[in-house]
Image (spheres, coloured by chain):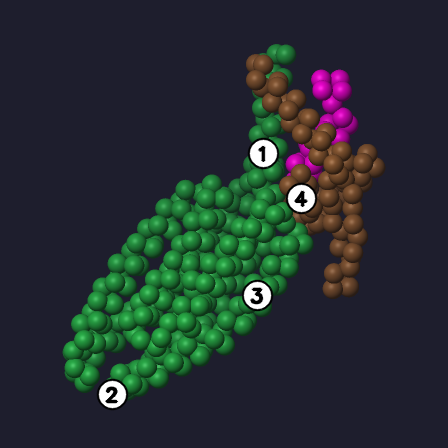
Chain colours: A green, B brown
Amino acid sequence: MDMKQSEEASKELSYIKTIMTKSQFSYRYGTKFFVIVACYLLIVNLTRKLLITLTLNMNSFLELYNVKLAEQLLMIIAVFPLLLIIFLFHRIAKRNSTDMSLWLYEICAFSIIVCTVMPPIILLPNITDNVIADIFSVAGVSICMFICGQFLQCKKMKVTAIVYFIIICIVLFIFGFLFVIVQTGSQDISDVKKSVLLMYSYGTSIINMCYSPLGYLLLGIEIYQTNKRSRNNVQ
Amino acid sequence: MNFDSIPEAFQTKLRVALMAALYNGPKDFKTLKLLTSSTDGNLSIQLTKLEEQGYLISRKSFVNKKSHTDYEATQIGKDKFEEYVDFLATIISTK
């Protein structure tokens, strides 16, 4: 067997590996799924942000708790369309993809529900607990990004997942810490405390509004690009 | 397996790609088209040839009143494909 045959065999084997790797994950539906989830979360978070604007006229923590209860109710309602989206994509993935892609898809769907949607519902309407909810939300995106990055062999995606998580956690910690200082004081909210409170409310809501949808959108785009790259490799 | 006994199924790039794609599990026509970047006509011809040789089976169904065809590699197809991959690996290792 000469060198030429060996080179051709190597090329053929590499081609087979590319196709097999590609066939393990439904890229087509992966992109659609994450883009739809991103749009959905953006709408939900925008509504949540609108609710937080109600805190502008509040005079006590009790009113703030009521707003938080309304936010919980919103998330309870919002979980149903999300479940429907996940169910529809699950059906498509089950019909078209391999066990591996379905497994990957299910992990991402589970992570979105558990980390992004459930914490605001489950946690008591205590404002400091919402820091945990936000961290969970950030973690949800990071977990999805990391798993997909690992599977797509995309180092950039994995690094982004870790860096995003650390940065947002630090920012959330600072906001949470400021709020704890305010909350452990008297029940009356002075102007200074109110501004800190608003800074926390808006800060976290903006981060929450931008981070999760942007993360899922980036993930969808990255899957699309990977699909395009591997398609070019095959050609 | 040697050069003379390579099955006809693995003598074109598209058929090899189809077997590689179906090795992991059943796929529909659209997914196979996306994976192999081939045209409808060519893909259809190669799938029929593979089916005739017993390397895969097709299942037709209706989803939302639209015709939907799923393809699945048979055990014979999988075994032959494994044999072919092993053959390629042997060529590389004996370089």
**Residue B30 among magenta residues:** no
Name which of mark 1 and mark 3 comes first in the sequence.
1
Instruction: Report how far apart the C-alphas of labels 2 and 1 lie in the structure.
Output: 64 Å
Residue A107: percent from left, percent from top: 51, 54
Q: Which residue is mark 1?
A: A17
Mark drawn on residue B25: 4
Amino acid of disc 3? Ile
Task: Give the vertical position of A215 relative to A226 (above or below).
Answer: below
Q: The magenta stretch spans which residues?
A: B1-21
* Discs 4 and 2 carry the same chain letter: no
Distance of label 4 from label 1 (alpha carbons)? 15 Å
Pointer 2 residue = A59
Answer with mark 2 or mark 3, whichever residue precedes in sequence: 2
C-alpha separation, residue under disc 1 versus residue under disc 3: 32 Å
Residue A121 quadrant? bottom left
Q: Main secondary structure of the magenta part?
A: helix
Is residue A57 shown left or right of residue A99? left
Q: Nearer the viewer, residue B24 or A235?
A: B24
Q: Share a chain, discs 4 and 1?
A: no
Residue A178 shows in this picture: yes
